[in-house]
Amino acid sequence: MRAWLLQRISAIYMLLFIIFFLTHFLVESPDSYQAWHGWMMSSGVSIATATFFAALLLHVWVGVRDVLMDYIHPLALRVSALTLLGIGLVAITAWVMRILLMEHS
């Protein structure tokens, strides 16, 4: 799949998720942390949230990668920048997954 199409699909998903998330909290805001936590831990919401962060990280990768490829011409410097970007995104992914999978009491 072409990179621009992945970026558009991820942008559409993120927009729809944000609309859903904000609408839910405007219409039916939770009364307590326990209510919010219960809603967030429901299967559909946790899958949608994990998919949102996957789309966000994919969107960042495609966008920043394209900018780096367009503006950094020396190959070694471009590979180094892309490697640092990849390492950073892997670290952010691990952090987000830790938060999403962590059970709070």
Image (cartoon, rainbow, N blue to C red):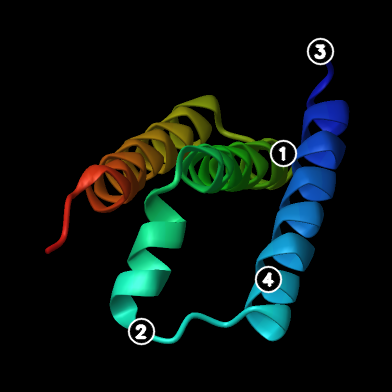
Q: The disc labelled 1 sits on which kind of residue?
A: Asp
Residue 99: mark: none
Q: Is residue 80 above or below residue 49?
A: above
Residue at horizontal 79%, vertical 26%? 3
The secondary structure type at the circle numbered 3 is loop
Earlier in the chain: of badge 3 and badge 2, it is 3
The secondary structure type at the circle numbered 2 is loop
In front here: 26 or 9? 26
Q: Mark 4 points at which residue?
A: 24
Q: The disc labelled 2 sits on which kind of residue?
A: Ser
Q: The disc labelled 4 sits on which kind of residue?
A: His
Earlier in the chain: of badge 1 and badge 3, it is 3
> Would residue 55 appear left or right of 81 to someone viewing this image?
right
Q: Name the residue under label 2.
A: 32
Residue at horizontal 83%, vertical 35%? 9
Earlier in the chain: of badge 1 and badge 4, it is 4
Foreground: disc 3 or disc 4: 4
In front here: 25 or 5? 25
The secondary structure type at the circle numbered 1 is helix
The secondary structure type at the circle numbered 4 is helix
Residue 66: mark: 1
Q: Position of residue 96 (x, y in %)?
A: 33, 49
Q: Distance between the residues labelled 3 and 4?
A: 33 Å
